[in-house]
Image (spheres, rainbow, N blue to C red):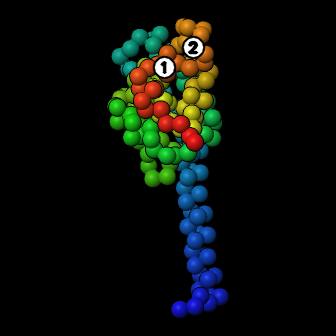
Amino acid sequence: MALTRRSFIKVAGVAAGALLVSLGLQNATVQNIKAEQIPGAGHKDTDSSNNEIKWYNRRLDNIDTAAFLAGCSRCGICIQKCPFNAIKSASIAVPQLTKVSQAKCPGYENCGICATVCPTDCLNDAFRNFRDKYNKDPAAGDKPHWVNGPYEKSERITPK
């Protein structure tokens, strides 16, 4: 069966409509992400002291949400590798912590597996202002203390 002009226009119109709808859904979900939803943000323990709550709020203030959103390729590797099953994704949305899963995340400075396996390094970019507080060794550069651990050597996925 030959493709007529009319059938081509129908197929192209449906494809263009589907593309616009998917881009619109993605844009709507991305615009609403907050710092506390970024993988590695950890959680605020309601039973903790005021100092810990202030520290958590300072950490959120230092997270660069725009850097995370710009770099995330939505590959889902961080979702698969999270040992706490804290990172979730809804359809084409970016990986994020939900209100329920937030309590499972120990935070970037304590775990960091999501940032270690990320092929785009967007989580390290998001925590750039925050991570210097955890580097006690000046020779370590600008990465957190866990980067040179055994997980880094065996699991890091590097883009080709």
In the image, 2 versus 150, the foreground residue is 150
Q: Is residue 108 above or below residue 9?
A: above
Residue furthest to the bottom in view is 1
Residue at left offset 58%, top offset 79%: 11
Residue type, mark 2 in image: Ala
Q: Would residue 101 be seen by someone viewing this image from the given angle?
A: no
In three-dimensional space, the C-alpha distance between marks 1 and 2, rounded to whole angstroms, equals: 9 Å
Residue type, mark 1 in image: Asn
Q: Is disc 2 surrounded by few (<14), some (14 to 19) or many (20+) residues within 10 Å? A: few
x then y, percent, for residue 66: 63, 36
Q: Give the residue pinned by disc 1.
A: 148
Total numbered labels = 2
Q: Would residue 127 be seen by someone viewing this image from the given angle?
A: yes
Residue at left offset 55%, top offset 8%: 137
Picture quadrant of residue 62: top right
Q: Give the residue pinned by disc 2.
A: 140
Query: Answer yes or no: do the residues labelled 1 and 2 have beta carbons within 8 Å?
Result: yes
Picture quadrant of residue 46: top left
x then y, percent, for residue 39: 47, 33
> What is the quadrant of the C terminus in the image?
top right
In the image, 75 versus 10, the foreground residue is 75
Q: Is residue 46 above or below residue 10?
A: above
Picture quadrant of residue 4: bottom right
x then y, percent, for residue 1: 53, 92
Mark 2 lies on a secondary structure that is helix
x then y, percent, for residue 115: 50, 30
Residue at left offset 45%, top offset 13%: 52
Residue 48 is left or right of residue 117, and the answer is left
Mark 1 lies on a secondary structure that is helix
Sequence-wise, the earlier of marks 1 and 2 is: 2
Q: Is residue 115 above or below residue 54?
A: below
